Image: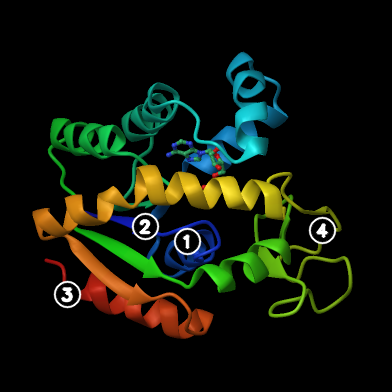
Amino acid sequence: MLNIILLGPPGAGKGTQARKLVEERGMVQLSTGDMLRAARTSGTEMGKKVAEVMDKGQLVTDEIVIGLIEEQLKTVKANGFIFDGFPRTLPQADALGRLLARNGQKLNAVVEMRVDDEALVARITGRYTCGECGEVYHDTTKPTKVDGTCDECGSTNLKRRADDNEDSLRTRLMEYYKKTSPLIGYYYHQGDLFPIDGLAEIDKVSSQINGVIDHQN
Ligand code: AMP
């Protein structure tokens, strides 16, 4: 059982790398962003409540996201979890530690994906994803092979996120520096932090992450 956190600002490549780990290692990706977007699409009360907050680029409450993760940890069986976009605040990090301990598990590694701010704007504003299988694309660095069609599943339902614009990104970055970046110190102190170069090519980033994982017991 191996549990890792992918930590980094919006656009660092957390989702892309989480998907690779799912494919290559059979781990399970727990993305609070995906869960919240699914709640919005299905029109649940919670989904309606968080929509505006998400579109502005602010963080939703700790209570909501901790509840989502708690539910997943209770119901999903896996040989390892990749936490993608969670935790994003110190109370969330504390809660995750408690939830894992309750299940007799622990956190193995926190991979900090380091990326320059300038690179994030370009990455985020060119990003789109497949609405069916979740594959992530980019206008210039990773376009679909056939215009408008997902390489992986053939769907033509390609989407851009409502919060992938420069205004929301500015707020998301501020939220990251104010509320999430203190987690770097928190996990460094625990001895769980592994910084990697998130600016490298996708496969190089992936091999750095695999290097970290292979060194865990
Ligand atoms: P992401 O897909 O991880 O970029 O998340 C998209 C949006 O969902 C964020 O900008 C927040 O509004 C919300 N969100 C996702 N995960 C969390 C979290 N752990 N804590 C608070 N808000 C979150």
Residue 199 lies left or right of residue 125; in this view the side is left
In this rendering, is residue 187 above or below 154? above
> Which residue is label 3 attached to?
215
Residue that protrudes farthest toward the right in the picture: 147
Of the residues under marks 1 and 4, which one precedes in the sequence? Answer: 1
Disc 3 marks a residue whose amino acid type is: His
Q: Can residue 78 be seen in this view?
A: yes
For marks 4 and 3, give the one nearer the viewer.
3
Label 4: which secondary element? loop
Label 3: which secondary element? loop
- Distance from disc 3 to disc 2, alpha carbons, whole Å, reads 18 Å
Label 1: which secondary element? helix
- Give whichever of 208, 124 is nearer the camera: 124
Does the CB distance between marks 1 and 3 fall below 8 Å?
Answer: no
- Distance from disc 1 to disc 4, alpha carbons, whole Å, reads 23 Å
- Is the shortest distance between ligand 1 and the CB of mark 1 under 8 Å? yes
- Distance from disc 2 to disc 4, alpha carbons, whole Å, reads 30 Å
| Image mark for residue 155 | 4
Rendering quarter of residue 213: bottom left
Does the CB distance between marks 1 and 2 fall below 8 Å?
Answer: yes
Within-10-Å neighbours for mark 2: few <14, some 14–19, many 20+: many
- Give whichever of 148, 198 is nearer the camera: 198
